[in-house]
Each structure stands twice: as C-alpha cells, then as structure tokens.
Amino acid sequence: MPIRFACFIGFLLITMTSCYKSKQTTLSVQVRTNLGLAINGASVTVQGVPPENSDGNALLIDYEEATNGNGIAFFNLEDIYKPGQSGAAIIEVKAQKSGLIAERIVDLVEEIENRVDLVLQ
C-alpha cells in the first residue's frame, strides 16, 4: 500500500508541474494629447533595445500599429517571450502624428499586460 501511495503522489507532482501554461505577454500603448484627449490614428512603433540579446543574436522586435478610437495601440508579444525566460526585452516605444512625437524606453515584463502612456508634444 505505501508503494502505491508514493507512486500516486509522484505521478500527481509530475502531472501538476508539467501542465503550467504561460500567460500572454502583451503591450498596450495609450496615446493622448497634453490635454488628456485620446489620439486616433497615431502611428506607434515598438523596436528592440539593445539590438542583441545575451546569445549575440539580433532581436527581431519591430512592430507598428495605429491607435484606435480610444487612442490605444495593442501588441501581442508572444513571439519574443519564451516560457522560463527571465524578462522579455527592453524596447523603445514611439508614437507620432501630425509632427508631434513621444517616446519611451520600456523594460517589458513577461506574462502580463504591459502598459505605456505617451503624451504627444
């Protein structure tokens, strides 16, 4: 009986640890005017900084989206984050429209919805 119980506990532990599902790594960028109004149609770019990771391979982080009616551009970054990795990336987020620009360097956190607020000036 103790051997069966030990086998059951071992099986249960292996099953529970192997079924971990990672959460999505996303980025939501809110673009506003200095008066706090949402800007529709602003161009938002996301690029990797620095251009290399610890393996010496170039990071291929280069996305562009336009903001929606609420002034939000949404990016799904699942392809740059691998489960078990510590940290996702350091990125530069830049928004522009009608000659106004805002930018920020952001350290992405894995498996959460990262948020950035930019004010065009």
Image: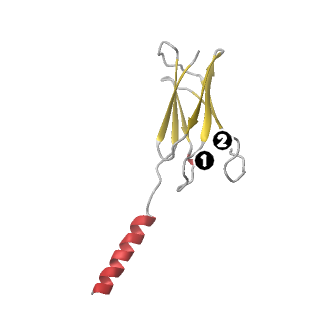
Q: Which corner quadrant holds the N terminus?
A: bottom left
The residue sitting at the front extreme is 54
Mark 2 is surrounded, within 10 Å at the Cα level, by few (under 14), some (14 to 19) or many (20 or more) other residues, namely: some
Q: Position of residue 89 (x, y in %)?
A: 59, 43
Which amino acid type corresponds to the residue marked 1 in the rendered image?
Ile
Q: Position of residue 87 (x, y in %)?
A: 55, 47
Q: Who's the residue at 58% across and 22% down the image?
A: 41
Badge number at residue 15? none
Describe the element under mark 1 as helix, strand or loop: helix
**Circle 2 residue:** 61
Labelled pair 2, 1 in contact (Cβ < 8 Å) = yes
Mark 1 is surrounded, within 10 Å at the Cα level, by few (under 14), some (14 to 19) or many (20 or more) other residues, namely: few
Examine the rendered structure and indicate whether residue 109 appears above or below residue 64: below
Q: Position of residue 77 (x, y in %)?
A: 56, 43
78 left or right of 6 in image: right
Q: Who's the residue at 52% across and 15% down the image?
A: 33
Q: Which corner quadrant holds the C terminus?
A: top right
Examine the rendered structure and indicate whether residue 6 appears above or below residue 91: below
Q: Who's the residue at 68% across and 40% down the image?
A: 50
Badge number at residue 80? 1
Which label's residue is closer to the chain start, 2 or 1? 2
* Distance of label 2 from label 1 (alpha carbons): 7 Å
